[in-house]
Image (cartoon, grey):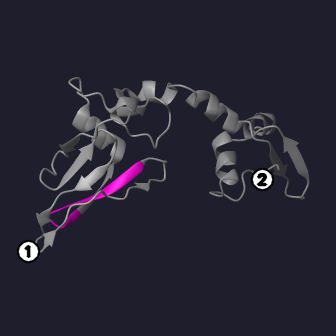
Amino acid sequence: MSEKEIWKDIKDYEGLYQISNLGRVRSLDRVDLQGRRLKGKVLADYLSGQGYFRVNLWRDGNMEHKLVHRLVAEAFISNPENIPQVNHKDEDKSNNRVDNLEYCTALYNNTYGTRTERAAKSRERPILVITSSGKHRFFESGEKASKLLGLDRSAVSKCLRGKRKTHRGFSFEWAV
């Protein structure tokens, strides 16, 4: 049995765009600024750098990027206490159905579900520390290398992500 799709106007875009309880966005039939008739359609969404789906909405010749999960929450979930963030209950950022979303605080969102365990596991990746003389030392994680060598953990992380070349004479690589 498939759920019935319900459409509501998007705040500040009434008569232009609507959002559904299933997380789809559509434009409505309208006349543009040049007097052309435009047929409404379901918009293609795209992934943001953080893994959330976004859409581009146009009004008065100006375009805005909007997060789909926020549009769903704003249209379908009451928020009388003005709670700032929207959480995906199943931790799947692509599931923007209204029954998968809830308003929450930043602390709740950042500690929800398996996020903490996944973040900790990602920090356990083994690395190689390369000295200025070219010697390679293996460490179980960037965190352990930082502790044992007295290095700044965030600087080591930046080196591993390619944001920096070296830190205190060392370079760093992910161990395979």
Q: Answer left or right for 14 relative to 52.
A: left
What residue range appears in magenta?
53-62
Mark 1: few/some/many CA within 10 Å (<14, 14-19, 20+): few
Q: Residue at x 18, y 57 (%)?
A: 28
Contact? badges 1 and 2 (CB < 8 Å): no
Residue 151's spot in the image, x, y percent? Answer: 73, 41
Q: Is residue 45 magenta?
A: no
Where disc 1 sits, the SS reads loop
* Magenta-drawn stretch contains 59: yes
Q: What residue appears at the point 23 percent right and 23 percent down from the top-left corner?
A: 81
Which amino acid, mark 1?
A: Gly
Residue 52: mark in rendering: none
Relative to 78, 37 lies left or right:
left
> Where's residue 163, x and y in %?
62, 57
Ranked by sequence position, the earlier of labels 1 and 2 is 1
Relative to 57, is 37 on the left or the right?
left
Can you identify the residue that label 1 sits on? 35
Look at discs 1 and 2 and give the one toward the viewer.
1
Look at mark 2 in the image and give the residue it sits on.
173
